[in-house]
Structure formats: C-alpha cells, structure tokens
C-alpha cells in the first residue's frame, strides 16, 4: 500500500479477508472441524468477491458507499482485534467452542455495526448483490451459534 489512506471500501474488503484468514487458520489448527472452518473461510472470500462486484458499480453511481456512523477508525480497530485473534490462534490451540464463540462475536459485530448498510444500490442488480451479502453475513452468525450450541459443554 502506498502512503495514501485506505478508503472505507478497502478496509471493508480487508476486514472480510482477515476474517477468512482467521477461519482458515482455525481449519489448519483443528483437523476435526477442518471442513466447517474451510467452508466459513470460503464464504468470507466469496463476500470479498461480492464487495469487489459492488465496487465495480460505484463509478457509474449504481452503488454508493456512504461512511455513515461507522468510520474508518472503527474498522481499523476491528482489524486490530482480528489480528490479535490470529496471533493468539497461532500461539495456542483454541478449543472448538472457544473458536466458535470468538467467531460468533465477529459475525454478530459485523451485522450489528451494519457494515453492509453503508452500501446503497440504485439498480435491481446491485440491490440483489447487497441482499445476498446481507443474508449470507447474518446466516454465518446463526450457523456459528447453532454449531456452538451443539458442541458446548452441558450446563453452560
């Protein structure tokens, strides 16, 4: 990256890429749940491609990215948090339910902060991409939570 400041869009792309990197690391560190974590990493990478698709609509103003209440600094803080989790996961083997809990927090944070609400579409095609992206992101949190419920210790 040159000396210029990253745009919010670039930060959002980096955010999804970092989360994919974390899930990929979990897949490497947890052979018993490798397929689950790989599928989650692949889904995050698919989100990156969808954001790139939206990015292609910005010059024609079919898609707008409006910073709103989430500022670049918020995304940078989130990225620092994920970087910390990556370091932790590289140093220690995290139990599956711990990794799931951390991942649920990540997925819920993305939805609650409305990261995708910064995009506004001016065509049916753009709105369809946005809707798919929002549905998939919300679905990840639910999938993580369901997997956590099935694997947590009784009584917790």
Image (tube, rainbow, N blue to C red):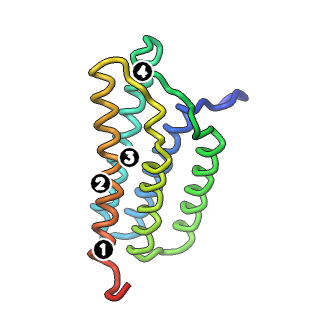
Instruction: Return the disc, 3 or 4, that comes first in the chain's sequence.
Output: 3
Q: Are marks 3 and 1 in contact (CB under 8 Å)?
A: no
Q: Are marks 1 and 4 in contact (CB under 8 Å)?
A: no
Residue 108: percent from the left, percent from the top?
Answer: 43, 56
| Structural distance between the alpha carbons of marks 3 and 1 | 22 Å
User: On the image, numbered disc 3 is attached to which residue?
Assistant: 44
Q: Are marks 2 and 3 in contact (CB under 8 Å)?
A: no
Q: Please name whichever residue, 14 or 135, is drawn nearer the observer in this view of the structure.
A: 135
Residue 56: percent from the left, percent from the top?
Answer: 42, 20
Residue drawn at x 53%, y 31% is 9
Residue 114: percent from the left, percent from the top?
Answer: 46, 43
State the image quarter where residue 63 is shown. Answer: top left
Instruction: Return the disc, 3 or 1, that comes first in the chain's sequence.
Output: 3
Q: Residues within 10 Å of mark 3 (few under 14, many from 20)?
A: many
User: On the image, numbered disc 4 is attached to which residue?
Assistant: 63
| Structural distance between the alpha carbons of marks 2 and 1 | 19 Å
Q: Are marks 3 and 4 in contact (CB under 8 Å)?
A: no
Q: Are marks 2 and 1 in contact (CB under 8 Å)?
A: no
User: On the image, numbered disc 2 is attached to which residue?
Assistant: 39
User: Could you say which disc has been placed on residue 27 in the image?
Assistant: none
Q: Residue furthest bottom?
A: 155
| Structural distance between the alpha carbons of marks 3 and 4 | 21 Å
On the rendered image, what quadrant is the C terminus found in? bottom left
| Structural distance between the alpha carbons of marks 1 and 4 | 38 Å
User: Could you say which disc has been placed on residue 149 in the image?
Assistant: 1
């Amino acid at each position: 990256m040159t000396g210029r400041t990253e745009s919010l869009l670039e930060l959002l792309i980096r955010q999804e890429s970092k989360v994919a990197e974390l899930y990929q690391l979990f897949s490497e560190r947890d052979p018993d749940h490798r397929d689950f974590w790989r599928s989650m990493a692949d889904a995050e990478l698919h989100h990156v491609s969808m954001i790139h698709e939206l990015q292609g609509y910005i010059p024609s103003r079919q898609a707008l990215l409006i910073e709103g209440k989430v500022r670049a600094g918020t995304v940078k803080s989130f990225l620092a948090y994920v970087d910390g989790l990556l370091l932790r996961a590289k140093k220690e083997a995290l139990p599956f339910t711990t990794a799931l809990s951390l991942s649920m927090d990540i997925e819920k944070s993305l939805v609650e902060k409305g990261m995708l609400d910064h995009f506004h579409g001016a065509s049916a095609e753009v709105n369809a991409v946005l809707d798919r992206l929002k549905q998939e992101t919300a679905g990840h949190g639910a999938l993580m939570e369901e997997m956590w419920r099935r694997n947590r210790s009784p009584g917790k």
